Amino acid sequence: MRDQAETLRLKMLKSQGELSKSIAIISGKGGVGKSNFSTNFAYALLSKGKKVLIIDMDIGMGNIHILLGATPQYSLKDYLHGTKEIDEIVNTAPRGLTFISGGSGLDSVMEWSAEMFERLIRAFEHLQQAYDFILFDMGAGATQSSIELIVAVDEIIVISTTEPTSITDAYSMMKFICLQDADKSFSIVSNRVSKYDDGNDAITRLQYAMRKFLGKETKLLGFLPEDPVVHKAVLAQEPFLLLFPNAPITKRMMAIAETFVSPSSSDGFKTGEGFLGKLRSLFTKGRG
Ligand SMILES: Nc1ncnc2c1ncn2[C@@H]1O[C@H](COP(=O)(O)OP(=O)(O)O)[C@@H](O)[C@H]1O
Ligand SMILES: [Mg+2]
């Protein structure tokens, strides 16, 4: 009975054509630039007139709010624990970007309970009507809960540097996700490419390994250069996209964002029904 009502609700949402596109930003190795990518990519989409929400999934070790120079009172933790409602944990950053903080305090590195997962689904049902894009800045490593979420989203962006350790960890992470869902596809962003290395070569090898061992084609979304403006922007706690609008890295980021907003972009960008449907089925399958 309940399932039917929910399916109907999702169908209605879809027919209104007002669902957001969900994108997970992941990596194998930590410290490769996920959070900086997420915040600046969000501003790039925002500058193209889209409504964007970032959810910091690095629960307990979140740093999206630090990159945005904000000190939010409540975080995703408070919502998952049931002490706050979803509207109370959505924060506004400069220029109308909205974000949900992962919160700090190491105590809370956790797997979600069934109740928390249900709350998460309910939150997305609510949020996906308000935004064009929901970006999940994923924490390092792969917990069961984070994999469930990654498998459910519409798109996965894998951030990797050109270092062999980053490349092999990115491969392992994609392989792990493919084992959960063989249909998943990936887009790669090659970050911190310096003029001394051949970023293209590293990514070509990664794409080759994906094709040969997993039978998967992976799309290269773009390269982002090694650029001192990133560090400067982190210190200033403002996105480089706003602080350095003419930097080469800003132009590259705008080009990547453009591929997500142009009408020709893959399958159109209103695919949230698939996302919620998947979350639900994973939830029922995994937890009985
Ligand atoms: N393209 C880049 N050029 C220079 N430094 C970068 C670049 N991307 C990331 N960094 C640096 O790498 C560090 C880690 O980035 P962060 O986004 O926090 O990684 P993650 O979220 O994957 O752990 C940041 O402090 C930033 O200064
Ligand atoms: Mg991070």
Image (tube, rainbow, N blue to C red):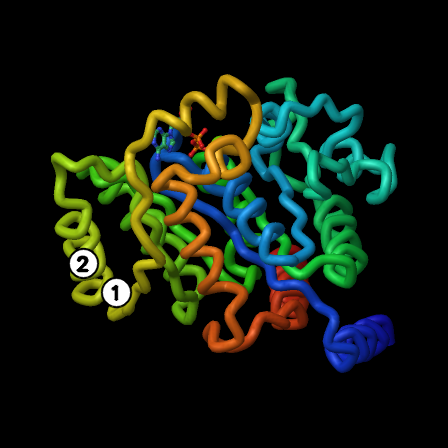
Vertical position of residue 69 compared to residue 182: above or below = above
Q: Is mark 1 within 8 Å of ligand 1?
A: no
Amino acid at pointer 2: Ala
**Type of amino acid at the residue the image marks with label 1:** Leu
- The reply to whether residue 285 is in sight is no
Badge 2 is on which residue? 209
Does the rendering let one see residue 207?
yes
Residue at mark 2: C-beta within 8 A of ligand 1: no
Which residue is depicted at the point 45% across and 64% down? 259
Residue at image location 34% in from the left, 25% down from the top? 228
Q: Compare residues 253 and 72 and report the one nearer the observer.
A: 253
Viewer-nearest residue: 102 or 109: 102
Indicate the quadrant where residue 247 lies. Answer: top left
Of 83 and 90, the residue lying toward us: 90
> Which x, y percent locates residue 273?
67, 71
Badge 2, how many Cα within 10 Å: few under 14, some, many 20+?
A: some
Q: Residue at the location (27% across, 50% down)? A: 171
Quadrant for the C terminus, please: bottom right
Residue 32 spot, x, y in % from top left: 36, 34
Q: Is residue 167 left or right of residue 144?
A: left
From mark 1 to mark 2, how far is it between C-alphas?
8 Å
Q: Position of residue 216 (x, y in %)?
A: 28, 68
Front of the two marks 1 and 2: 2
Earlier in the chain: of badge 1 and badge 2, it is 2
Residue 214's tag is: 1
Quadrant of the drawing holding the N terminus: bottom right
Q: Secondary structure at mark 2?
A: helix
Residue 158 located left or right of residue 13: left
Structural crowding at the residue carrying mark 1, measured as other residues with C-alpha within 10 Å and reported as few (<14), some (14–19) or many (≥20): some
Task: Give the vertical position of 62 relative to 2 (above or below).
Answer: above
